[in-house]
Structure formats: C-alpha cells, structure tokens
Amino acid sequence: MATIVLTAVGNAIGGPIGGAIGAAIGQQVDRALFTGKSREGPRLKELDVQTSSYGSDIPAIFGTMRVAGTVIWATDLIEHRTRSGGKGRPSTVNYSYSVSIAIALSSRPVESIGRIWADGNLLRGTAGDLKVDTQFRWYSGHGDQMLDPLIASAEAAGQSPAYRGIAYAVFEDLQLADYGNRIPSLTFEIFERSAPVPVQDIIADASVGTISGASSETLTGYAMSGQDGRSAIAPLLAVMPILLRPKAGQLNLLDWQSSGASTSVMMPVTSEGAQTFDRPARGLEPAYSVPNSLAIRHYEPARDFQSGIQRSQRSGSGRTSRQIDLPAAVDAVAALRLADLQLLQAQRERDGWSGQVALGPDNLHAGDWITDQAGSRWRITELEHFRGTMKVTAQGSTPYDPVSPGAASPGRNISAPDLLAGETQIVLIDMPVLDGIEPGKPQIAAFCAGTAKGWRRAALSVQSGDALLDIGSSASPAVIGSALTALPPHNANLVDMSGALDIQLLHDGMDIPAGSGSPLANGAGLCWLEGEFLRYGSAVYLGNGHYRLTQLLRGCYGTEALISGHQAGDRFVLLQSDTGRLIENVNLVPGMQLSVEAMGLGDTHPVTASAIITGNAIRPLAPVHGEATQNADGSLNIGWVRRARIDAGWHDGVDQALVEDREQYAVTFSAGGQHVGSREVATNALALTPSEIAGFGLPSATPLVADIRQIGRFAQSNPLTVVIGG
C-alpha cells in the first residue's frame, strides 16, 4: 500500500519526522486510489434456499413480499413403486418419491398467499392452481389458528403445536418427480396486505409503539428481521428520507421534508462568565471521503421480487462507491429516487458547522434545522448544553430535495409461465403393432391431454369389478382434437389426393407436424380418427388450433371397415411414441369393455373413458386382392394375398413374415344372406369342384359370397369378401 511505501521512503530521507509526513501523504493516496466498495445493510437473503436450522430468523412480513421461509416440520421421503412391461417387453420397476412438509413464512399474520415457485418454476399460479400433484394448505398466523390435521396425526398426542402467531404453509404428499426426486427450493409470494405499507407502520411495530410520528414514505413490502427493534429498522433509516428526532424523552419520526418546517436562527457567543469559546467555524471533509456512486439493492416487484439494483452517480472527486441492501420490495423508479437522495445527502454532509450559541426561545433537538448568520441552513447532529449557552454541531443538508430519477429500468424479467391446466381429455385406442415386437395380448393405450396449455399429466386408474386399480400416471400430453367436417370414404388401396381432414385441436399450444410430403414415406404422420388409422402427407396450420390434413392413406392396420361413417365431431389423436400410456398388468381379453379413469390437476372429478377391446395387436390383418375364376368345367378357383399384422418392412422378392404359428384360413360361403358352407385351407387359394358348388344349393341367379379370414395365433382376422357370379 502507498502508506507503507511512503513511510519507508520518509524514514530513509528524513528519519521519524519524514516517516510521519510520508505516512500522512500515503493515507491520503490510499483513500483516493485504493478504497474499495463499501456495503451496508443486511444481505438480501429472503430468496435463498429455505432453512431448517434452530434459531433461524422468521421474518415479519409487511405488505407484499417473496420469501423462502423456514422448514418447521417434514416427513422422510416416501417411496412409490410402479411396475411396467410384460410379455415381450422387459419388466421395469419405476421409483418415485414424495414428501410432506411445513414451512414457516412470517412471524406476523398474513392476508393471503399468492404464487409459489419451486426451483424457480411455478408450483402454484396466480389463480391458485397447482402445477404439481400435492395437497396444499396455509395458515394465516392469527392467535386462534387450529392444528394442521396431517401434522397432528403424525405427532404424538399433545405434542403437535398449532404454530399460532406464525403464518405457514403445508404441502401434503408433494410429488418430487419434476425436481429430480429431491425437495426443491420453495419461495412464496406473501400478502400481509395488498396495498402499499406505510413506513411509519413498520417502525411503530418494531418499536412496540415507542416511536411516534408520521411519514409519507411507503413500500410495496418489507421483511423485518433482527435481534431487536434497532436492527429491525436500521435498513429503513439508512435508505429512506426519514429521521428520528428526540423530543420529550421519546423519538419522533419525521420525513426530511417535514423536519425543515421551522428553522431557528443561531446567535453565536464567545464567552459565558469566565469561560471563552471559539467562534463558530465551518469544516469541509475531503472529497474522497464521500462516494461518487451509491447503489440501492432491493426486491423488484416487476421481476417477480428477484433482487434488483439501482445506482445513482454524481460528478466529484470521490473514488468510492457505496451499496446499501434494503430488504424491501420497491419498484425501480422508487429505488433510483432513494439512491439519488442518499447520494446527494452524503455529499452535502461533507460541509460541517460547529459553534457556541445563545439559548433562544426554541427548544432545539437533534434533527432540527438552524440558520447561521450568513443565512446558510444546517441540520443539528449534536447538542451540548451549558448554563446559558449550548454547543451546536451540524451538517449541511436540505429539508427535502425532490430528485427526478429519470428513466429507471427494473431489468429484463423472464417469468415462469403461469398456464392453467384445464380439464383432462382421455381417449382409449386399441393399438396395432407399431414397433415390430410380438405383444401376445391386446395393446390398449390411453392418450391424455388437457383443454389448456398448462396440462401436464393425469393419474390413471382401471375399473376392476367394483374397485379401481391404480396404474400410475399418463404419458406426455397427447395431441387430441376433433373433426370439423365429415371425412368422406375412399379406397384404402389408393392415396386420397382430393380429400381433406380438418381438425380442431383442444388448444393452440398443440402442434401437428407438417408431414413428409407423402403418406407412403418412412416416418409419415400417423393418426387415429374414431377407430380408423390413417397416414397423412401434408398438414397445414390455419390458425387458432385448426389444421388441415391432406394426401391421406386410409384404413391402415386393418381398419378398412371403419373408413365409412365418419362425422363432424369425431375424435382425433395424433399417434406419437411418447404420448400413449399402455394399460399394463391388467388381463385384457378381446370383447371385454375396458374403463379407465383419469384425474388431472385441473379436474374437480375423474374423467372416464371406455372401449370395447378388439385386439388389433393380436388379430391378423384381413387378406387382400381376392379374386375368383370360374372355369369352363364349372369349377371355381379363389385366391387372395396374405398380410402380416407385424410389418417387417418391404423387401423385394421376399414374402412377408408369417408371424402366426401356421398359415391357416377359414372360408365361409353364403347366398342370399344364408350360410351355405365353409372350408379351412393352409394356403392362400381354394378350389371348388362343380359337385361342391352344387352341394351349396344355390338358387338360380343368386351370387355366392365368400368371406375369407386368416386364423391367427390369438384370433381370426376381419373378412375379405369376394362376390362370385350373380
């Protein structure tokens, strides 16, 4: 440091006297060049991770604030296990965790609790809606509040406190999956009152009424803490344009403005009896002793009560900057005004005045204003009384200087989205095999979504007799909507280039991919329309959740029979691998009715969906390209092409994989609606002799109808119908 260097140089040149001179000069250089930033006030800690230590301060909240609070009660983490997988798929045990916890928020009553953040993301929105599965309760902190039932049930009889006088919140069974299965950092928006809080109310509360007076200053909110009343209000006295004036044995609160309402003129004296006094004198502190920059760090309401900082700078020879932490919520304009006022005051307090003056008719106190004989105004900082005189020490100041803060910006704020969940919508779909793996049983998937953007998941239960079997939560939100117009039928063997499917999605936060340009391309979009599977080549967004799908391939995965009969309002689901939740660990049998209940965060009652199981995943696809040839001798040849329910991909020159245990077909014949015969064959062809045809006893000119079904491992396919003759 300069002091050490110049002291050494001074000693070398002039001995101890030279060293003293060098030290004095060095200290001035140190102060001018090397003085660092100073910081005052309690650190802004209310948004830190909540604590659970004994002896931690529980702040008293005034107005509106955001606080982390103190954990006062909690359970151990509760483990939940669910099993997924089954035949053909690996069995997996999934673990999730929850916790029940109580957090103290304020050591004085509050009016309400607003938003709640968990790790910076909203856990509770402005409307009071919860974004995570939990039960939430809060207690206002009044003296008559009752025991929390969860805490009372977990503790021994008579050992559970009601925490009267403390406002606190309770989360029961808070699901932790969204937070890495750990307790997140929680912060709460607290309303002790919704209106701005007068500073005089805070000081009166902290001083238990011993400080009287009035102030025009207000704050959005204040977190009062400290070991005593002095430390509780010290940040306010350091930042706000207020002062405490002793009067009649008490302290009186005044604004800077009101404290200058009356000014006494001082009459200097040079002696009192045999005692003589120096004449009044003015002193000026060095410029480097005051900062040229002063910052106020505060909580910014426009940035969800995160910490903000406003800095005031003035020209001068000062080399220091000063920062004051104010544990209060004020907007950017108000914070910059406070910084301006405090910096101006600090610079004006360089100028000092002291002198012995005659006692006048006014009863002066520290904080009063005086005028010297030159007409300059001073604020009294110290008074020392003698018999007929008093010694006055004062500083230069103004009663109030309305500084114009100019443009003050709170800074950029990226708020956590506050989206409502809406009501849960659920669609059960009897799925075909999409992944090439033999499932061995019907594959029923629940596709769930909400009517609003904030929906995330729902708890699912399967109706089993008179009971409900919990099967866990739904998958990622699905893209669900409804048809705006009826979709006309079309040949399943040809791409529909003229038809269009208009879809209205549940909300405009959903999206349908634009498509690959052809429904035959790898990765072409696959969707479900009231039982029919279809692919599309192009999807165009028309606004407000409205899409138009064109280039359609109809009746995919053996749903040709459902191509006809579509109406406006038919349900629509975009089939994506991560949005369907398979119903597992339930005995699913073709022909049975399956009922599933879903309960999302925005639901007031469960939503139910039902479906009759057809077994698309285990039922062979109906044969195609059926044809019949009548020979000259009266015999009949019928042929068809087999399809596989598990698509192994197209390979030139290679037949489709059989998939089933054996190739077998059931062919039934009817005429005029009456059954006339049946056959079973092991190849995709059947020959009927004239005598066999005659045995059917067909009426004259009545066509023969052949229904061809493949016999699979678990079920028979839908029929391929071939009409012969007529």
Image (cartoon, rainbow, N blue to C red):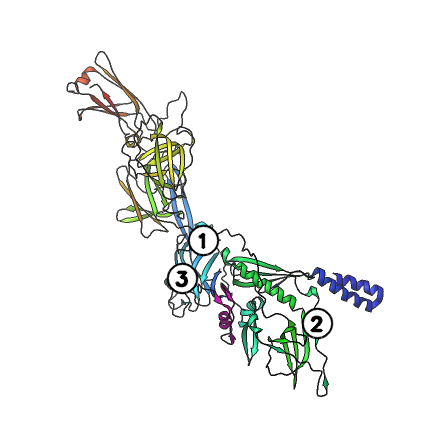
Residue 17: % across, % down: 82, 69
Find the magenta span and give its range: 194-222
Three-letter amino acid code at the position of disc 3: Trp
Secondary structure, mark 1, is: strand
For marks 1 and 2, give the CA distance: 56 Å
Can residue 605 be found in the magenta stretch?
Answer: no
Task: Look at 32% across and 53% down and name the residue there.
Answer: 604
Q: Which residue is mark 2?
A: 283
Q: Nearer the viewer, mark 2 or mark 3?
A: 2
**Which quadrant: the C terminus?**
top left
Three-letter amino acid code at the position of disc 2: Gly
Q: Nearer the viewer, mark 3 or mark 1?
A: 1
For marks 2 and 3, give the CA distance: 58 Å
Can you tell which mark lies on residue 122?
1
Specify few, some or many for label 3: CA neighbours under 10 Å numbering under 14, 14-19, or 20 or more: some
Specify few, some or many for label 1: CA neighbours under 10 Å numbering under 14, 14-19, or 20 or more: many
Q: Which residue is mark 3?
A: 138
Three-letter amino acid code at the position of disc 1: Leu
Secondary structure, mark 3, is: strand
Secondary structure, mark 2, is: strand
Q: Quadrant of residue 159?
A: bottom left
Which comes sooner in the sequence, label 3 or label 1? 1
Which comes sooner in the sequence, label 2 or label 3? 3
Q: Nearer the viewer, residue 601 or 393?
A: 393
Decide if residue 38 is on the left or right side of residue 64. right
Q: Quadrant of residue 3?
A: bottom right
Say if residue 217 shows up in the picture. Answer: yes
Q: Is residue 377 above or below residue 708?
A: below
